[in-house]
Amino acid sequence: MKPVDPVITPERIAVVGIGGGGCHAVSTMAKQWEHGPVLIAINTDAQSLSSNQIPRRLQIGEKITRGMGAGGDMEVGRLAAEDDFEALRDLFREIDLVFVVTTLGGGTGSGAAPIVARAAREGGSLVIALATLPFDFEGTQRAALAGKALAELSDQADVVITVPNQALAATAGEGATAVDAFQQADYILGMGVLALWKLLVQRGLMNVDFATLRTVARCSGGFSVFSYGEGRGAHRTADALESALQSPLLENGQALAEAESALVSILGGPDLTLREVDTLMAGIRNFCRKDIHLTMGTTIDPLWHDTVAVVIVASQYWRPDEEEEPASPPTPEPAPAAEGTPAQSGKRRKRSGTTQGQLGFDAIGKGIFKDVEPTYRNGEDLDIPTFHRRRATLEK
């Protein structure tokens, strides 16, 4: 990891949109703040990229796609990113923190996002990925593709925040038009990134430094989810708290109740009081398990007078004993994964101090269910046993 200044500056933080959906989301974010982080758009589609308003853009895989996109093929997206891997690494040479924003289920986003995350990590950056998952109406094939991409992305990013489009659109309400729903979705995604980077670059009542964020990211195993709540006026605290906790993105609070780790970012104006902060944190703690590892910070922004916003990032696990594997000497090739189990080839962390043997289960075929489509929920294949999906090892 490259040395980091005590106060990280906006120009050392990058928000990268990958593929059509990711680039559109980041372009929308750019309208929500001034003097923000470095914004980068990466795509295989030359026409879509040229119409994007983000000034820093990179077309990948020109020799492979001839600028016409990946055509929904994840492998084409991956090859396009691999073909321009050195150019990707050059983007992150002076960057300490990278937010990778992508839509999974298509070609470029699904295939290129893990490669972009690897390029950023190899440059020494901390990588936080926000990956949106397909709507239910997009079908099982697209969901399966998103699930595969999500497993690969989790191998390369330090933490992956999954954002189901179905839940994201639901935050706009049942009566919202399609345009309203997508605008609301882009706004929430943008505010999630905004609140996190403001924790690092602006002073507040309680600050979170880069080292703390890095520790939280690398000890929070598995996938994470997030929600956003905002309130104005006399009841701003109660409104922000209710909308964040009852958000479909948190499964109406269930995801937070089961989380072992959570990061809370509170954003307000100069009129934000310690009593309001205490009220927000008390309400959040009431939803959490007692032993949760909770990290919080507040940011004061003059533009947020009479307004309070709260972002909650909830993670499945808290694993403080996980450490990075040494870069050398090289480790032997791992045994092939059982059928249906996501590959773990890119994992960089391991538990220290203990070893476990594995029970000698033989792989069992699916029998009459071999031709049945897999069942995916939030990017996880539910046909894979829970201990496999959570990467647990059973002792002999």
Image: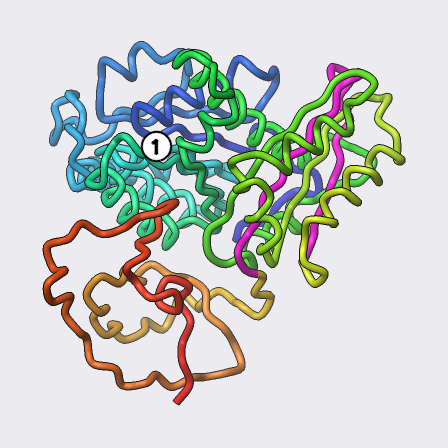
Q: Judge from the rendering whether residue 189 lies leftward or rightward of residue 357; answer left or right.
A: right
Question: Residue 43 in the image: x percent, y percent?
Answer: 28, 26
* Range drawn in magenta: 293-317
Residue drawn 36% across and 73% down?
329
Residue drawn 44% across and 68% down?
326
> In which image quadrant can residue 274 be found?
top right
393 w.r.t. 281: above or below = below
Question: Residue 154 in the image: x percent, y percent?
Answer: 39, 51
Q: Secondary structure at mark 1?
A: strand
377 w.r.t. 58: above or below = below
| Amino acid bearing label 1 | Thr
Residue drawn 60% across and 58% down?
260
Please name the residue that numbered disc 1 is placed on: 103
Question: Residue 137 in the image: x percent, y percent?
Answer: 28, 30
Q: Specify the farthest residue to the bottom.
A: 396
Magenta-span inclusion, residue 303: yes
